[in-house]
Image (cartoon, rainbow, N blue to C red):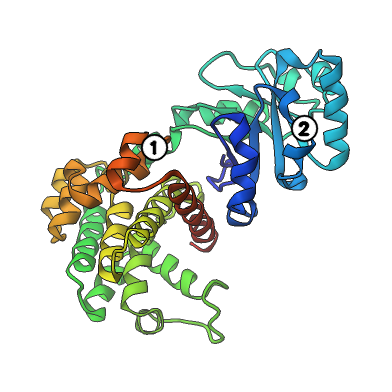
Amino acid sequence: MANAHNEWVAVTLHGPQAWTAPLLAAADAYAFLAPLDCIIPLADPHGVDEAVLAQLAPQRTIFRLPAHLAGDKSLQKKCRQWRDAGYRILLDGADASPVVAAQVDARALSFDAAGARPALHQLLPLPGPHLAYNIADAGQIAALQELGVSWFAGDYALQHARQQGEPDDATSRRRLMALLGLLARDADAHELEVPLKQDPSLSYHLLKLVNSAAFGFTAPITSFSQAITLLGRRQLQRWLQLLLYARQQDDGKIHALLPLAAVRAAQMEALCQLRGGDRDAQDLAFMAGVFSLLDVLLGMPMQEIIATLNLAPEVSAALLERDGELGTLLALVESATPPPEGLRRAGIDGETYWRSLLQAYQWAIQVSRNL
């Protein structure tokens, strides 16, 4: 879930309800996902007993209840107990009303943006934040904001990125492609400085990054040569790959693709490491993950992008055809719900996948706050 500035605010955990609490508790997921809230859809609210609650963090957990269950007297009693314990309740359904929400102590509504929408009078009396999910087009967000919605979820991030790309800005594209080419062939620091100095947005974000609390340098960093020296080649390459997604938008928002690229890159690296890959292999896995959204970012076919870069053959094969070991991993991390056969093909069990995903989210959250 993101707010109107494309900053992540919460995650929804999809899957069998009986699995949710044990997964959150066993992997210490709340710590990895901090400070994001965790939204748990409840198809069967009566299945949430004391044993389940003991595995959850009340102040970070939001229960999403179907609106048609709000009239259940025993559920209303449960909801009052949950509220008193610190849990929040999100009433799901476009036909919900403030009166119905009050029956289960819900302070906000959620609804499927692909279907009917609630009216302003349904949302306005409640404090929120209200949530719209399954948003496929970023153009819907302005109208949803007018309704009072402030949390958004769906594939709109990819559509938004395409619309906000710069397919007609040949100069900007050439600079991006030149920088990508330099990174791919491990160019020296002086060569990297040239496109950085030509692109004010990338320059700003690089200096902002190295001066952030994430690095803890005591003296301010004011030049590219300082930044390159202090970060080191390996870290510089990684951060510059991500900085391609941090280009300032006209409306001042962070790029919607940035956290998605960070998750893919970090999970690819984690899975490669867990499979025994060395440091060089992990770097290639990270690169495949972060570059996998370049076609969306640049509004270009991936074939054209690869043709201009001097990438390692295994990275090119992964990006173009999802071929080889890297391609297998990339197909896995791109899946919203990884299929069992995909996990078996990659030689990864469910617990390993879950832990790698949590690590990736933790890193992406940090990245989004520092870029």
Q: How crowded is mark 1: few (under 14 residues within 10 Å), some or many (20 or more)?
A: some
Is the Cβ of the residue at disc 1 closer than 8 Å to that at disc 2?
no
Residue shown at 32% from the left, 74% from the top: 234
Mark 1 vs mark 2: in front: 2
Numbered circle sitting on residue 338? 1
Which element carries disc 1, helix, strand or loop? loop
Figure quadrant of the N terminus:
top right
Q: In this view, does 100 lie to the left or right of 295?
A: right
Numbered circle sitting on residue 49? 2
Q: In which quarter of the image is residue 312?
A: bottom left
Above or below 86: residue 100: above
Front-most of residues 10 and 298? 10
Q: In this view, does 353 lie to the left or right of 225?
A: right
For the residue marked with disc 1, what is the amino acid? Answer: Pro
Front-most of residues 178 and 50? 50
Residue shown at 53% from the left, 57% from the top: 362
For the residue marked with disc 2, what is the amino acid? Answer: Asp
Q: In which quarter of the image is residue 273?
A: bottom left
Front-most of residues 10 and 167? 10
Q: Quadrant of residue 115?
A: top right
Above or below 274: residue 234: below
Is residue 166 visible from the viewing direction of this image? no
Q: Where is residue 40 in the image (x, y as percent from the top left)?
A: 64, 34
Q: Is residue 303 left or right of residue 4?
A: left
Which element carries disc 2, helix, strand or loop? loop
Q: Residues within 10 Å of mark 2 (few under 14, many from 20)?
A: few
Q: Where is residue 315 in the image (x, y as percent from the top left)?
A: 20, 55
